[in-house]
């Protein structure tokens, strides 16, 4: 399972990318606003291809507006995927973009039926929202497993990108449930590194290394 950073903050994306553990970033209007981004076009323009793929979300009300926004960002020549909502207008835009070989991530997915529709519309990625489902007392990780099962039975090529992950446990569970990708917030990515035995082991190695020459 590949990782993306769930963030609109360039400093976080740059640093996580330098660690060699992410293949890009997912954004949404909320994350970009939180990071102080004012123009999506400027944000996409400043994207470094070495950071991987940037998933950027359209916010127009209808398919024509969504496709127009997407084509404007694609024309900037960066490695991007276009996020569209799982609505009739969003999926109509997905179909049009997929026909132009533009990778589309269908977002705000909360059920297997939505994931099946996204695949039919030609989505490259589908994003089930694990944490938000659990906020409402539903089983987010199980949805990832169900989508993987449903897709595999008929050879659907759409990749599952687990989103709305709140802790390291979620990341481990969606990997075992068959997600192809997981997008993780900055704090969760840092927690993924942490293990008390690594800290303890390093302390001991450092103490012994002090008596050695390199
Ligand atoms: C990523 O593509 C999603 O927009 C994001 O993971 C949503 O996370 P949230 O539910 O924590 O807002």
Image (spheres, rainbow, N blue to C red):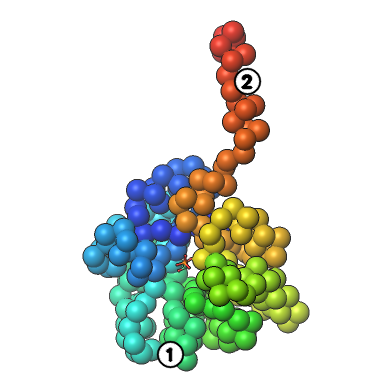
Image position of 116 with respect to 47: above or below: below
- Is residue 110 left or right of 68 when viewed as pictured? right
Image position of 181 with respect to 213: above or below: below
Determine whether label 2 and label 1 are within 8 Å by CB: no
Sequence order check, earlier mark of 2 and 1? 1
In front of the other: 192 or 76: 192
In front of the other: 63 or 128: 128
Q: CA distance from mark 2 to mark 1?
A: 58 Å
Residue 73 position by quadrant: bottom left
**What residue would you read off at disc 1?**
89
Image position of 132 with respect to 167: above or below: below
Counting from the top left corner in percent of width and height, residue 168 is at 59, 53
Q: Nearer the viewer, mark 2 or mark 1?
A: 2
Res. 102 in view: no
Residue 135 position by quadrant: bottom right
- Is residue 29 left or right of 190 when viewed as pictured? left
**What residue would you read off at disc 2?**
204
Is the shortest distance between ligand 1 and the CB of mark 2 under 8 Å? no
Residue positioned 70% across, 76% down in the render: 146
Residue positioned 37% across, 83% down in the render: 67
Q: Quadrant of the N terminus?
A: bottom right
Q: Name the residue furthest right.
A: 153
Residue positioned 34% across, 87% down in the render: 61
Q: Tell me the SS state at disc 2.
A: helix
In front of the other: 89 or 138: 138
């Amino acid at each position: 399972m590949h990782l993306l950073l769930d963030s609109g903050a360039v400093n976080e994306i740059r640093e996580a990318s330098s660690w060699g553990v992410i293949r890009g970033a997912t954004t949404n209007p909320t994350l970009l606003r939180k990071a102080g981004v004012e123009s999506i076009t400027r944000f996409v323009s400043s994207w470094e291809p070495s950071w991987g793929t940037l998933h950027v979300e359209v916010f127009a009300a209808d398919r024509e507006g969504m496709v127009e926004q997407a084509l404007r960002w694609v024309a900037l020549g960066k490695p991007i995927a276009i996020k569209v909502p799982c609505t009739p207008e969003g999926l109509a835009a997905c179909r049009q973009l997929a026909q132009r070989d533009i990778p589309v991530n269908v977002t705000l997915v909360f059920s297997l039926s939505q994931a099946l529709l996204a695949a039919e519309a030609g989505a490259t990625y589908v994003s089930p929202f694990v944490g938000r489902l659990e906020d409402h007392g539903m089983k987010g990780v199980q949805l990832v497993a169900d989508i993987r099962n449903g897709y595999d039975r008929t050879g659907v090529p759409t990749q599952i990108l687990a989103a709305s992950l709140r802790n390291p446990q979620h990341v481990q569970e969606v990997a075992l449930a068959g997600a192809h990708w997981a997008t993780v917030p900055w704090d969760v990515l840092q927690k993924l590194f942490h293990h008390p035995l690594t800290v303890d082991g390093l302390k001991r190695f450092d103490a012994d290394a002090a008596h050695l020459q390199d």
